Image (spheres, helix red, strand yellow):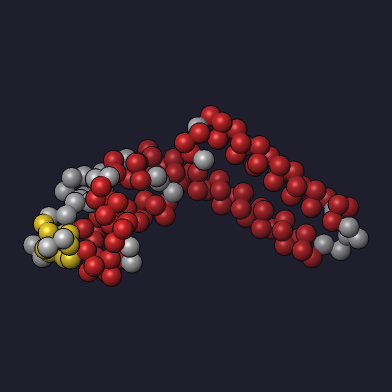
Amino acid sequence: MKTLDISEVSERTGIAPSTLRYYEEIGLIASVARHGLRRQFDDGVLARLSLIALGKAAGFPLSEISRMVREDGTPALPRASLHAKADDLDRRIRELTALRNLMRHVAECPAPSHMECDSFRRLLSIAHRRARSSVSRTRKHPNRA
């Protein structure tokens, strides 16, 4: 087992040492030793950090990611959660694609005023619904804001 100094792990992954220390504090990773005050990690931490980065990119909070990584660093991926997240991403992609298309239309709209453009008015309606939905979710789950 090769050990890596915290600075090596940071350099190889692009993750700040402060973030690595935080991940250790919350139990996502674990150092195996210290060399002076510097944390040492086994080289398996690189794969574990890649898994954490993948989870974050998919939109999972760290609390869920921590349940997706076993003590030995191997993945414990709940398929139902992955399917649900993929469905959520599909929905968001559709919404963002529609929003992008409307924005392009509004940018090139020949109407004399944007308020005379049906597409622009639809864009305003979508923005209003999203804002109301966001406020509603925040009220139901205040820690998600």
Q: Image check: 115 left or right of 127?
A: right
Identity of the residue furthest to the left in this view: 1
Q: Position of residue 58 (x, y in %)?
A: 42, 51
The image shows residue 10 at horizontal and vertical percentages of: 28, 66
Q: Residue furthest top?
A: 140
Q: Looking at the picture, tell me which residue is in the foreground, 1 or 97.
A: 1
State the quadrant of the N terminus.
bottom left
Q: Is residue 105 toward the left or the right of residue 43 in the image?
A: right
Q: Residue at x 65, y 42 (%)?
A: 130
Q: Residue at x 24, y 67 (%)?
A: 7
Q: Residue 54, position in %: x, y?
A: 36, 55
> Quadrant of the rendered structure where residue 40 is?
bottom left
Residue at horizontal 55 percent and vertical 35 percent from the top: 138
Total marks shown come to: 0
- Residue at 50% over, 32% down: 141
View extreme (right): residue: 112
In front: 38, or 122?
A: 38
In the displayed structure, would residue 18 be above or below residue 75?
A: below
Instruction: Give percent across and percent down for residue 84.
Output: 44, 40
Question: Is residue 57 shown to the viewer in this render?
Answer: yes
Q: In the rendered image, which quarter is residue 129 located in?
A: top right
